[in-house]
Image: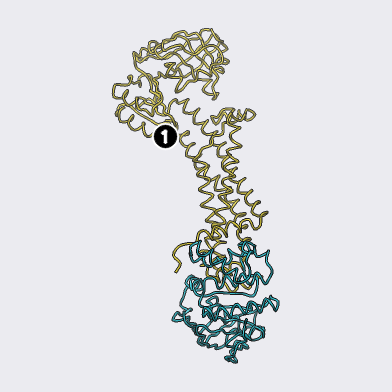
Chain colours: A cyan, B yellow
């Protein structure tokens, strides 16, 4: 998987009698290894664009390509397979499966994709150690703090080394220290494994880590600038 | 592309989700357990009743298969007698699935005591063979059973004794016709009084030695019928057909369900009734099952959306919900079956239903009901519960599998 290309995306939602514009002629190309922040106020279309890129939601019109694959032409099952193989998701909160332990949550994608037990166990222990959750592998999500839960979610998103990670307000429920640690981890993964990151956020601290800052308003891209990200330890 | 289903994770999720709401799962399990118990327990009682009815009925015919003169059933007169089995028929009667056979003389007659007379069915029997097929020597309540085929005594029913106002040891006169239409009569001493499960039998059937009757009726070695029985009235085909062929066209060979079509229809009706009973109970259960699954699905819409977002195919979500239902059904079935076995075992010596026995007697059943727990009925109930249970679970499972991930993730 090399790049993401969105061409003239339109998306509207019906809320009662009112029609809300989610995406309004959005076109953007994100190259492999990019670290993009989608910013803007609530309702600006960040999450809608993120969901469309991940094949979770389909636009009313327009095309989305991941590499050469046009998402609009894939069935629900094929989209699920594509997400499983190529995309890691990090959501704002409550994004762990409550009946699975931290390790099992991390192993979820690998298990669904049929990876042998030995390999996935090794990987999950290693990644949980990397995100600072060594010794908490067998805890259920309810036994972890919000920050720890978010780190498990990140571990799950990166453990199978996807080409693309889509994160929707990943630091919304985290304190500033944990938030900084998480962003540091993202940057490290971006640099070390060339994983593409697209992060929807309205947190200015998060935006500082991005190589590219895309601002949205009323479903439109109003600016798209490259920037020099802050350095992490 | 994913080619095989990750059964382990589907099973793990299904099992743990099942116990997420202990109380709801336990209530549903209790409902399935009681439902399955009711299916099997009531079926065992009904089977016991019908088995008893059929056993009594077949014993009274008697035999699971009868060989008669082709006209005997329409006109049971003495001229429609048959000869004793020839060598070919005797060979067929050696079939390992045949447990016993006997020959009988059976004619209409009149019995007279000092005070009254009545029309009866007079049956000449070979006591040793008859005891294995028809008349039960244990039913003699006073006196003795016939000693041999030449015994000159007569066995009569307790009710008949009452009607004739006679008693054990007294003489009665039997009158019938010989093949030349001449009156054949002789006196018999009442040597035994029997009590039958069916009052009608007790009131109009008397037994004498077969050779004694052959002499009285000038039948030489002719008989009215041959009665044959196997190990199980449900499985007579293996020996009935060879017997029919060996008997040839000059004899009529009839299985019990054709000899007495009422009995035959009882068996088919019972099988149908069991099926309807199981389905009716299941239908009441299915509402609870569907409700449990719908609640379980609605409680975790966001989670299902998350799993879809992470790459779980809709089909896997469907299998996960169906696995949950399957596990619930299997546990309920195991408990229900176990409960049924545990509650039926202490009743193997029979349930006294004498308080309603008068009414039951009309249907041909006795006053002690023996529940008949059959593996086939347990299997039938289990298969129906699993099959229909999964069928009714498809709706909530399909609903869960067709969630839109974005909408699902947006639910609280």
Which residue is located at x 43 percent, y 26 percent?
B63
Query: Number of marks in the image?
Result: 1
Q: Which residue is mark 1?
A: B235
Q: Is residue B391 above or below residue B102?
A: below
Q: Is residue B298 visible?
A: no
Q: In the displayed structure, would residue A115 be above or below residue B240?
A: below
Dot 1 falls on which chain?
B
* Residue that appears at 64% across and 64% down: A136
Viewer-side residue, A231 vs B340: A231
Q: Is residue B339 visible?
A: yes
List x then y, in percent, for residue B99: 41, 25
B301 on left or right of B184: right
Q: Position of residue B308 (x, y in %)?
A: 55, 69
What residue do we see at 58% from left, 41% from top?
A: B338
Residue A229 screen position, x and y as percent: 60, 87
Tell me what residue is drawn at x 53 percent, y 65 percent: A122
User: Which image quadrant: the C terminus of chain A?
Assistant: bottom right
Look at the numbered disc 1 and give the secondary structure of its residue.
loop
């Amino acid at each position: 998987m090399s790049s993401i290309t969105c061409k003239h995306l339109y998306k509207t939602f019906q809320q009662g009698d009112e029609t809300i514009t989610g995406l309004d002629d959005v076109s953007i190309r994100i190259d492999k290894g990019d670290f993009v922040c989608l910013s803007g106020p609530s309702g600006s279309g960040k999450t809608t664009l993120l969901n469309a890129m991940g094949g979770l939601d389909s636009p009313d019109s327009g095309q989305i390509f991941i590499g050469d694959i046009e998402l609009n032409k894939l069935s629900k099952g094929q989209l699920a397979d594509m997400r499983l193989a190529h995309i890691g998701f990090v959501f704002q909160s409550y994004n762990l499966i409550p009946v699975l332990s931290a390790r099992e949550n991390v192993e979820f994608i690998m298990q669904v994709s049929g990876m042998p037990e030995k390999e996935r166990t090794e990987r999950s222990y290693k990644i949980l150690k990397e995100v600072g959750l060594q010794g908490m592998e067998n805890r259920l999500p309810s036994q972890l703090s919000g920050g720890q839960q978010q780190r498990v979610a990140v571990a799950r998103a990166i453990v199978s080394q996807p080409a693309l990670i889509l994160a929707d307000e990943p630091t919304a429920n985290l304190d500033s220290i944990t938030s900084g640690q998480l962003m540091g981890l993202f940057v490290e993964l971006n640099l070390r494994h060339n994983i593409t990151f697209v992060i929807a956020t309205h947190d200015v601290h998060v935006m500082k880590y991005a190589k590219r800052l895309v601002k949205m308003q009323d479903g439109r891209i109003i600016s798209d600038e490259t920037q020099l990200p802050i350095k992490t330890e | 592309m994913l080619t095989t289903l990750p059964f382990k994770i589907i099973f793990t999720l299904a099992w743990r989700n099942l116990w997420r709401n202990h109380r709801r799962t336990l209530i549903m399990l209790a409902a399935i357990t009681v439902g399955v118990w009711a299916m099997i327990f009531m079926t065992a009682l009904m089977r016991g009743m019908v088995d008893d009815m059929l056993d009594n009925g077949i014993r009274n015919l008697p035999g699971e298969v009868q060989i008669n003169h082709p006209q005997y059933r329409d006109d049971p007169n003495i001229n429609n007698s048959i000869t004793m089995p020839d060598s070919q028929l005797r060979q067929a009667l050696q079939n390992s699935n045949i447990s016993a056979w006997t020959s009988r003389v059976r004619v209409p007659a009149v019995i007279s005591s000092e005070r009254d007379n009545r029309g009866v069915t007079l049956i000449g029997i070979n006591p040793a063979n008859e005891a294995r097929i028809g008349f039960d020597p244990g039913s003699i309540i006073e006196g003795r059973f016939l000693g041999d085929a030449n015994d000159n005594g007569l066995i009569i029913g307790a009710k008949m004794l009452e009607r004739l106002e006679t008693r054990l040891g007294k003489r009665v006169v039997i009158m019938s016709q010989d093949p030349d239409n001449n009156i054949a009569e002789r006196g018999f001493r009442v040597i035994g009084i029997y009590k039958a499960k069916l009052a009608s039998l007790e009131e109009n059937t008397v037994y004498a030695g077969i050779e004694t009757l052959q002499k009285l009726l000038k039948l030489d070695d002719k008989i009215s019928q041959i009665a044959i029985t196997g190990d199980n009235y449900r499985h007579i085909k293996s020996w009935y057909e060879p017997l029919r062929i060996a008997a040839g066209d000059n004899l009529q060979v009839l299985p019990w369900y054709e000899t007495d079509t009422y009995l035959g229809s009882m068996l088919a009706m019972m099988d149908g009734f069991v099926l309807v009973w199981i389905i009716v109970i299941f239908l009441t259960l299915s509402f609870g099952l569907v409700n449990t699954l719908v609640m379980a699905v609605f409680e975790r819409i966001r989670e299902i959306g998350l799993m879809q977002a992470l790459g779980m195919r809709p089909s896997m979500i469907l299998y996960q919900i169906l696995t949950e239902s399957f596990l619930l059904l299997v546990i309920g079935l195991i408990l229900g079956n176990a409960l049924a076995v545990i509650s039926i075992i202490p009743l193997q010596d029979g349930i006294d239903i004498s308080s309603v026995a008068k009414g039951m007697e009309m249907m041909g059943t006795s006053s002690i009901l023996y529940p008949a727990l059959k593996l086939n009925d347990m299997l039938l109930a289990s298969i129906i519960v699993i099959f229909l249970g999964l069928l009714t679970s498809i709706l909530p499972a399909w609903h869960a599998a067709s969630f839109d991930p974005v909408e699902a993730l947006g639910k609280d």
